[in-house]
Image (cartoon, rainbow, N blue to C red):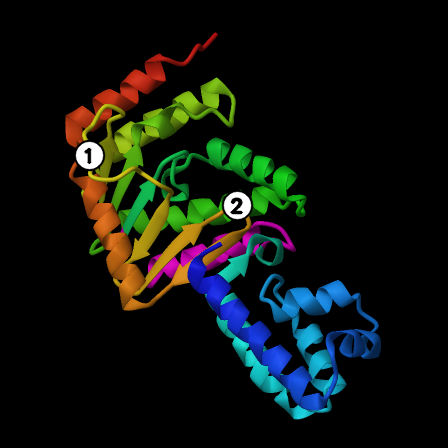
Amino acid sequence: MSTDFQSARAALGARLRELRTESGLNGKGVAEVLGWQRSKVSRLENGKQTPSATDLEEWARAVGRPGVASELKGRLVGLETQYRSWRRQLAGGHRARQELAITETTAVRLVRGMEVSRISGLFQTADYARHAFEVNAEFRRVPRDIEAAVRARMRRQEALYETGRSFRFLVWEAALYVLTCPQDVMAAQLDRLTGLVGLDTVEIGVVPLGAQLRRAPGHGFWIYDRRRVIVETINTEMWLDDEENISLYERAWEAMAEAAVHGPQAQGLIRRARAALRLT
């Protein structure tokens, strides 16, 4: 989790502690009023746990300040707008998040991205996407609306063929070898990626494993125009729209772009990865 998120959550916890202190209650007292474990009160006040909206409403009532609930929930919304847990986003399955991706993609003209361990959803075949959703649903233990999610992901790709849009993506060569699907599915995926290299709206750069880099690849991210950066972690998706973070990720993208190869050279690396597959 990012330091910014931790700081914001700690500030919310400090506000809860302030309200409790003003009410004359100690930690044990507020826990008894709410019927909570004392440890939960401690975690919330010390910014170690993210409260729910209901937690905040109950806290406001317990300290005799029900009117402050709207302020507390406003702080929580600020956290959740930037830091969206996968547990909540995927509570009903993957389709809703894919439809949101369609909205985000069609609202911008330039998308820049970096992938280090997989093929971007914008370039996935239906079979590759299907396996990706199945793996993720099992890992996260969320509903399996696989086919609806695949259809939504395929609809998002229509933007690749629209005049006036530009998709500039970097792929670390290692991602071409990561197998989370059957080898024949990966072979078809790599064929698709090779074909997209020549599309006029798409620029795909492959960063060779042996390339001299200014910085390590780190993790994947997507820059939408200069409006927003989206970064995925295992448990959270971060939506960052402040100038400092946008500039930071632009520098990270440019640092990797310097080492990338394009056109026939990129196709050559993709074909080499495909040739390495042990197809029967």
Q: Is residue 268 left or right of residue 241?
A: left
Which dot marks residue 114?
none
Q: Residue at x 22, y 51 (%)?
A: 251
> Looking at the picture, how far across and down is residue 219, in whole percent?
38, 42
Q: Is residue 123 magenta?
A: no
Amino acid type at circle 2 is Ile
Q: Is residue 87 visible?
A: yes
> Looking at the picture, how far across and down is residue 45, in whole percent?
63, 71
**Above/below status of 45 relative to 196:** below
**Above/below status of 3 relative to 157:** below
Q: Residue at x 58, y 42 (%)?
A: 147
> Looking at the picture, how far across and down is residue 13, in whole percent?
59, 73
Tell me the quarter of the picture where residue 16 sits.
bottom right
Q: Which residue is mark 1?
A: 260
Q: Secondary structure at mark 1?
A: loop
Q: Which residue is mark 2?
A: 234
Q: Is residue 238 left or right of residue 52?
A: left
Q: Residue at x 28, y 19 (%)?
A: 271
Chain part drawn in magenta: 90-111
Q: Nearer the viewer, residue 187 or 73?
A: 73
